[in-house]
Image (cartoon, helix red, strand yellow):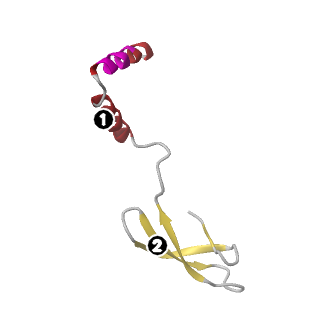
Amino acid sequence: MRVVCPHCSQKAKITSSNAMSDTVKDLYCVCLNTRECGASFVFTLAYKHDLNPPQKTTLQIAAHLINNLKPDQRKVLAAQVDWIG
């Protein structure tokens, strides 16, 4: 992961980090442009959302949806799944 100084747009180095939670971390950084900048700052790295959820989660969602269908809706779905497979 590349960190860029927000002040001079040069490369920065992560010197340490602090986990705020399982999905959020503070990254303590220092600008490598020591001659003209040399700033130190904190970036926050955070999980935002899935683009494609894990397979287990997808299967859990599918099972939940199927379990909440009425019997006639399950028959329609079963016919569609047989058609796809």
User: Does the segment drawn in magenta span residue 75?
Assistant: yes
Callout 1 secondary element: helix
Which of 85 and 12 lies nearest the eye of the viewer?
85
Which of 48 and 25 lies nearest the eye of the viewer?
48
Callout 2 secondary element: strand
Q: Residue at x 44, y 17 (%)?
A: 84
Q: Residue at x 34, y 17 (%)?
A: 78
Q: Which residues are magenta?
A: 72-79
Residue 29 falls in which quadrant of the image?
bottom right
Q: Is residue 83 above or below residue 50?
A: above
Q: Is residue 14 above or below residue 53?
A: below
Using the numbered discs, state the Cα–Cα distance from disc 2 to disc 1 in whole angstroms: 36 Å
Q: Residue at x 57, y 74 (%)?
A: 13
Residue 68 falls in which quadrant of the image?
top left
The amino acid type, in three-letter code, at marker 1 is His
Q: Nearer the viewer, mark 2 or mark 1?
A: 1
Residue where numbered disc 2 is placed: 26
Residue where numbered disc 1 is placed: 64
- Tell me which numbered mark, 2 or 1, is placed earlier along the sequence: 2
Q: Main secondary structure of the magenta part?
A: helix
Q: Residue at x 41, y 62 (%)?
A: 23
Q: Is residue 36 above or below residue 53?
A: below
The amino acid type, in three-letter code, at marker 2 is Asp
Q: Residues within 10 Å of mark 1 (few under 14, many from 20)?
A: few
| Residue 32 percent coordinates (x, y) | 64, 78
Which of 33 and 51 lies nearest the eye of the viewer?
51
Q: How many marks?
A: 2
